[in-house]
Image: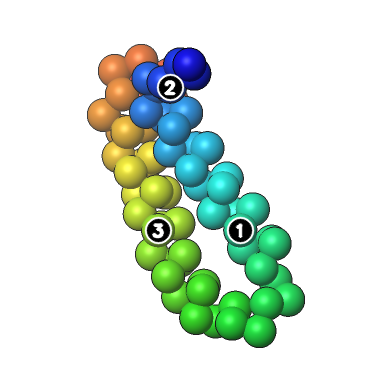
Amino acid sequence: MSKKIEDQKLILTLAHQQIENLVSLLEDNPYRPYIYQHLNPIKYELLRQLTNLNVTDPNNKTQS
């Protein structure tokens, strides 16, 4: 049985990396534009959530 990852920042970062991996793998796919139009909203939603998490994270060291 595998352990579930609890860290939301890690989950979002890994999900974003998976999207980037898909983009790279499908670079020569003839249906690339169709696939990308579905991957792009997911990519930017993940980035939005990561940004929001960084802004609201009380342990974030980049805030003043």
In this figure, which residue is indicated by the disc labeled 3?
42
Amino acid marked by disc 3:
Ile
Q: Tell me if residue 24 comes above or below residue 2 in the rendering.
A: below
**Depth-wise, is mark 2 or mark 3 nearer the camera?**
2
Judge the density around disc 2: few (<14), some (14-19), many (≥20) Cα neighbours within 10 Å.
Answer: few
In this picture, residue 27 sits left or right of residue 37: right
Q: Residue at x 51, y 72 (%)?
A: 36
* Quadrant in which the C terminus is drawn: top left
Chain-order first, disc 2 or disc 3: 2
Q: Position of residue 9 (x, y in %)?
A: 42, 29
Residue 45 image-quadrant placement? bottom left
Q: Tell me if residue 29 comes above or below residue 55 in the rendering.
A: below
**Depth-wise, is mark 1 or mark 3 nearer the camera?**
1
Q: Secondary structure at mark 1?
A: helix
Residue 57 image-quadrant placement? top left
Residue 7 image-quadrant placement? top left
Chain-order first, disc 2 or disc 1: 2
How far apart marks 2 and 3 lie (CA) works out to 20 Å
In this figure, which residue is indicated by the disc labeled 2?
5
In this picture, residue 25 sits left or right of residue 49: right
Q: Secondary structure at mark 3?
A: helix
In this figure, which residue is indicated by the disc labeled 1?
22
How far apart marks 2 and 1 lie (CA) works out to 22 Å
Amino acid marked by disc 1:
Leu
Amino acid marked by disc 2:
Ile
Here the colouring is rainbow
Chain-order first, disc 1 or disc 3: 1
Q: Residue at x 37, y 41 (%)?
A: 51
Viewer-nearest residue: 35 or 2:
2
Viewer-nearest residue: 4 or 8:
4
Q: Residue at x 49, y 18 (%)?
A: 2
How far apart marks 1 and 3 lie (CA) works out to 12 Å
